[in-house]
Amino acid sequence: MFNALGINQANLRIWFEDFEDMQGTDVVAAIYLAEYLNVDMSDIMDKLDGFFFMRDMLKRTQQIT
């Protein structure tokens, strides 16, 4: 997840505040948002509630703006 989010010295604080303790499906959703939908790291936490898993695929329940 560290690589998917593009962690660097400038955004390391966000990693420790929001992502370091993340577990389970939230990790997969965060990686999907970052790598496949190019959602900015600072917006990912707000988008996680809009995702659920169905038949082993990550599905969106809301449009990402």
Image: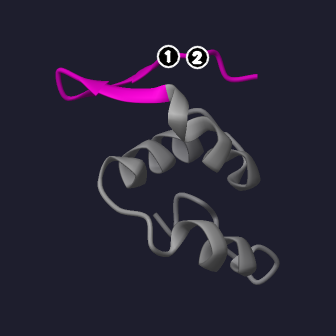
- For residue 64, which quarter of the picture? top right
Secondary structure of the residue carrying numbered label 1: loop
Residue under the point 47% across and 49% down: 31
Vertical order, 29 against 6 (above or below):
above
Q: Residue furthest front?
A: 49
Residue 25 belongs to the span the image colors magenta: no
| Residue located 76% across and 22% down the image | 65
| Measured Cα–Cα span from mark 2 to mark 1 | 4 Å
Residue at the spot of label 2: 62
Nearer to me, 28 or 26: 26
Are circles 2 and 1 on residues that touch, CB within 8 Å? yes
Q: Which disc is residue 15 wearing? A: none
5 left or right, relative to 61:
right
Q: Position of residue 44 (x, y in %)?
A: 64, 46
Q: Position of residue 26 (x, y in %)?
A: 41, 49
Quick check: 22 above or below 36?
A: below
Residue 45 on image: x %, y %: 62, 49
- Estimate how packed mark 1 is, as few (under 14), some (14 to 19) or many (20 or more) residues with alpha carbons within 10 Å: few
Where residue 61 is drawn, which disc sits there?
A: 1
Which amino acid type is shown beneath numbered disc 2?
Gln
Q: Magenta residues?
A: 51-65
- Per the image, label 2 sits on a secondary structure element best described as loop
Q: Residue at x 59, y 60 (%)?
A: 5
